[in-house]
Image (spheres, rainbow, N blue to C red):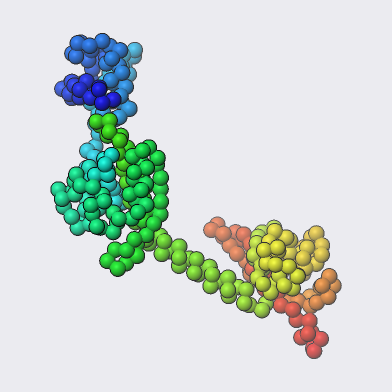
């Protein structure tokens, strides 16, 4: 592509001077070269986004590209964007990165990434993968760095890039995902605390879907049926409790499905030889329909005998 740069530049100038459009023949006459060569150059300009084409019947008419300036595109996003040449020197970056680094554009253009002490540019994976992008390998990483004594999380895309002069380079799109990571950590902690609470309750608790299938079971529930909590998942509640392939007549969940209200029943179950008090509470989906139920089962055999 380097050997065509003179011709490509000339065609771009011709199109710019003829904004109403030109055919391959028009450009061929203007440049005094054959149509096949012009067609080849135009294909390169179309692919690189420097020209546009509209078909009018059998004729193909070419126009100069109406592209938004790169500097404007870079500042459309809240991400940090960097364009590097094959030597890992800065070609361009957006205002967000300049503000983060507290540096002027003229003080960074043309300098190597490795010449800066800014922590965001000294992430080892950033430089390593930028070099791989120059060699044609795209990659995305998540990493963290410290900025003003605060730990920040980044998602960095390394995109292979070919510039107008045919030289390879890399575009880095750096997204600050700190808030997302913090939210994920809080959610993980909340889930962990919920799991501890769920499994520390002495009552037998299970969560069922709308088809009486066990979705979750706590430790007390599983131990009663002599299995692990994960082994309960996928089984029918009536299979474990009643040893049947259908629901039990005083089933509280059937009442919940009918009334959409919590229900409590008490009965003796011959299958396990125990008396239970079982409470069921509905779980509603976004449409207000019942999607499941939370069951709390208490073994009241000893209480019944005292009474």
Instruction: Please tell me which residue is depicted at 24% across the width and 40% down the height of the picture.
Output: 70
Instruction: Please tell me which residue is depicted at 45% across the width and 62% down the height of the picture.
Output: 184
Q: Position of residue 208 (x, y in %)?
A: 66, 63
Compared to residue 270, the image places residue 108 above or below, namely above
Instruction: Please tell me which residue is depicted at 71% across the width and 77% down the height of the picture.
Output: 298
Q: Position of residue 302 (x, y in %)?
A: 78, 85
State whether residue 258 appears in this view.
no
Q: Total marks drawn?
A: 0
Compared to residue 48, the image places residue 269 above or below, namely below
Q: Residue furthest bottom?
A: 306
Which residue is more in the foreground, 26 or 41?
Answer: 41
Compared to residue 188, the image places residue 175 above or below, namely above
In which quarter of the view is residue 253 placed? Answer: bottom right
Which residue is more in the foreground, 243 or 140?
Answer: 140
Where, quadrant-wise, is the C terminus in this rendering? bottom right
Where, quadrant-wise, is the N terminus in this rendering? top left
Which residue is more in the foreground, 277 or 23?
Answer: 23
Instruction: Please tell me which residue is depicted at 31% across the width and 51% down the height of the picture.
Output: 79
In which quarter of the view is residue 227 placed? Answer: bottom right
Q: Position of residue 189 (x, y in %)?
A: 49, 69
State whether residue 139 appears in this view.
yes
Q: Position of residue 33 (x, y in %)?
A: 22, 11
């Amino acid at each position: 592509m380097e050997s065509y740069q003179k011709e490509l530049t000339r065609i771009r100038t011709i199109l710019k001077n003829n904004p109403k459009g030109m055919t391959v023949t028009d450009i061929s006459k203007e440049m005094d070269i054959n149509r096949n060569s012009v067609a080849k150059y135009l294909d390169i300009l179309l692919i690189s986004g420097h020209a546009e084409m509209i078909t009018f019947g059998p004729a193909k008419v070419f126009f100069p590209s109406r592209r938004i300036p790169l500097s404007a595109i870079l500042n459309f996003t809240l991400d940090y964007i960097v364009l590097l040449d094959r030597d890992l020197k800065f070609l361009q970056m957006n205002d967000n990165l300049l503000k983060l680094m507290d540096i002027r554009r003229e003080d960074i253009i043309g300098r190597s990434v490795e010449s800066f002490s800014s922590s965001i540019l000294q992430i080892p994976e950033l430089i390593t993968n930028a070099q791989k992008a120059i060699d044609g390998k795209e990659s995305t990483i998540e990493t963290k760095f410290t900025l003003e004594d605060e730990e920040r999380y980044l998602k960095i895309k390394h995109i292979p890039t070919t510039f107008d002069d045919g030289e390879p380079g890399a575009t880095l799109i750096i997204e600050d995902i700190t808030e997302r990571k913090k939210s994920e950590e809080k959610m993980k902690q909340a889930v962990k605390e919920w799991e501890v609470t769920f499994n520390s309750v002495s009552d037998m608790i299970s969560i069922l879907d709308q088809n009486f299938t066990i979705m979750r079971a706590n430790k007390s529930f599983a131990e009663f049926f002599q299995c692990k909590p994960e082994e309960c998942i996928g089984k029918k509640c009536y299979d474990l409790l009643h040893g049947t392939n259908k629901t039990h007549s005083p089933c509280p969940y059937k009442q919940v499905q009918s009334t959409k209200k919590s229900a409590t029943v008490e009965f003796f179950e011959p299958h396990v030889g125990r008396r239970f008090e079982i409470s069921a509470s509905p779980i509603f989906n976004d449409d207000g329909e019942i999607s499941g139920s939370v069951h709390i089962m208490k073994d009241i055999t000893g209480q019944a005998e005292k009474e």
